[in-house]
Amino acid sequence: MAKHVIAALREFPAGTRKLVDIKGRQIAVFNINGEFFALANRCPHQGGSLYDGRLTGLIESNEPGRYRYSRRGEIIRCPWHGWEFDVRTGKSWCDPSRVRARQFAVSVAPGSALVEGPYVAETFPVSVEDDYVVLDA
Amino acid sequence: MTVSWSTIDCDVHVNVPSMKALLPHLDQYWRDSVVDRGMNSLDSISYPPNAPLTARPDWRGRAGEPPNTLDMLRSHALDRWNIDIAICNCLYGVQLLYSEDMAAAFAKAVNDWVAAEWLDRDARLRASIVVPMQNPDYAVAEIERCAKDRRFVQVLVLAMGEAPLGRRQYWPVYAAAERHGLPLGLHAGSSYRHPVTSLGWPSWYVEDYCAQSQGFQSQVASLVCEGVFVKFPKLRVVLLESGVTWLPAFLWRLSKFWRGVRLEVPWVDRSPLEIVREHVRLTIQPFDGPDDPSAVARLIDHMQSDDMLLFSSDFPHWQFDGDDIMPVGIPERLHGRIRRDNALATYGRLTETLV
């Protein structure tokens, strides 16, 4: 595992997502209301691209006809078969203990901290005035 | 050969021999209406008297008629197989009537006829309550009326009626069934509101009979997806004369697609496989498996439950020959469960009056 600078914070606004390639591994990174989440871009079911899925909310119910809808935008649905994954845990809704998408840590760090290393930032010129999105993968 | 097992037969049929038999159980208006309107019979086309399936040849009477008497039921089934308890399911055309009032009147007549002519005459017999599902309020009233008699152990509806059975319009019926500890029995058959296949009407009887399993599948899906078992967690559903072997493959399919689109039905909060294993039971005749015993054993393994199968002869329907009620290949270790334990766990009322 190494830390990779994947974007300047101002270039990765809330409500957007990026697909990054870390040494051949595809990782989908989401900025949801200012919080960053990263999942392996391979649905654990059959390998669909989670990056291409829809973000939806968590729908629950304890009685037919009653809908409890929360955490809007925090559930990614695989575009292939519609399986839902919690972006905070990577767990699938349908079989959370056995089926989960691999998660990676994402953080935001100031350029002043990054220039001192040991971060991998091959593609980004880092300036001390800006903040950056750092993926631990 | 007779068998020595203690046995509960969860599906035997008693047939209303003629409209005349019901007259004493109708009120005066309906009794006169039978004559005034020239009603001869409410038999449906589900089991035509001369169809081979309708009655085994060696059980038919001298004139070839289906075995409609208590003596015939006793000698061909109850005594022969040492049946401790048999649950009578009367398939009469009550569900086919368009008039809700007439359906209610004839449901009552059928249930009272069953009690008087069968339950009162043999202590081994129990029965299902025929209900007029055309009007759920009337169905509830009939359940309330009959449930006082503890020999009624189940609510009986047809596999194919007016609408999918999970729909909320039917929920008062399920509330009443659950309240009285009565499973909901779905029996093969149709009220013929719709073609018996989703494609339209088939040409032949064999197609109609085979298509019953499609009806059962759709009802299982409806009951699960509409959340009936979430709303009524104690309700049990028994599929009668449904066949058995289609269930595992259907549940794999239902559970697979639930994973992808469960957000439509968020109250289905666990796999349909689990829900059905907990709530749904099936009778073993007709057993629609292959002849190869090892293949049957694999099929039973696919049920992934030892609790789901209930013994049934489906008397007098011609589903097997001789005394081969228990399909060859069902593991010995399950025979006791199938013959007795599973029925006792399903029908709460049976333990109260076990002979």
Image (cartoon, helix red, strand yellow):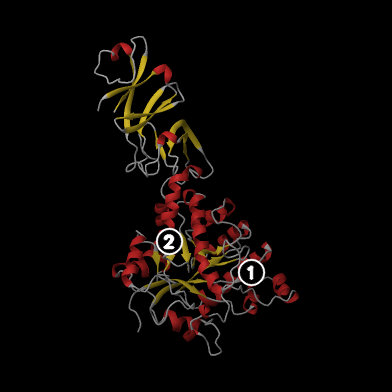
In whole angstroms, how far apart are the C-alphas of marks 1 and 2? 33 Å
Q: Measuring 65% from the left and 79% from the top, which residue is drawn there? A: B20
Q: Pointer 2 indicates a residue of which chain? A: B
- Which quadrant would residue A85 be assigned to in this image? top left
Q: Is residue B279 visible?
A: no
Percent position of residue A57, x then y: 47, 34
Amino acid type, callout 2? Leu
Percent position of residue B316, x then y: 49, 78
Percent position of residue B5, x then y: 33, 75
Query: Is B243 on the left-hand or right-hand side of A44?
Result: right
In this rendering, do the residues under marks 1 and 2 share a single chain?
yes
Q: Which mark is residue B244?
A: none
> B148 and A17: which one is in front?
A17
The kind of secondary structure element at disc 1 is: helix
Q: Residue furthest top?
A: A129
Q: Is residue B17 visible?
A: yes
Q: Which residue is mark 1?
A: B106
- Which quadrant would residue B319 be assigned to in this image? bottom left
Q: Which mark is residue B247?
A: 2
The kind of secondary structure element at disc 2 is: helix
Quarter of the figure that contains the C terminus of chain B? bottom left
Amino acid type, callout 1? Phe
Q: Residue furthest bottom?
A: B62
Q: Residue furthest front?
A: A123
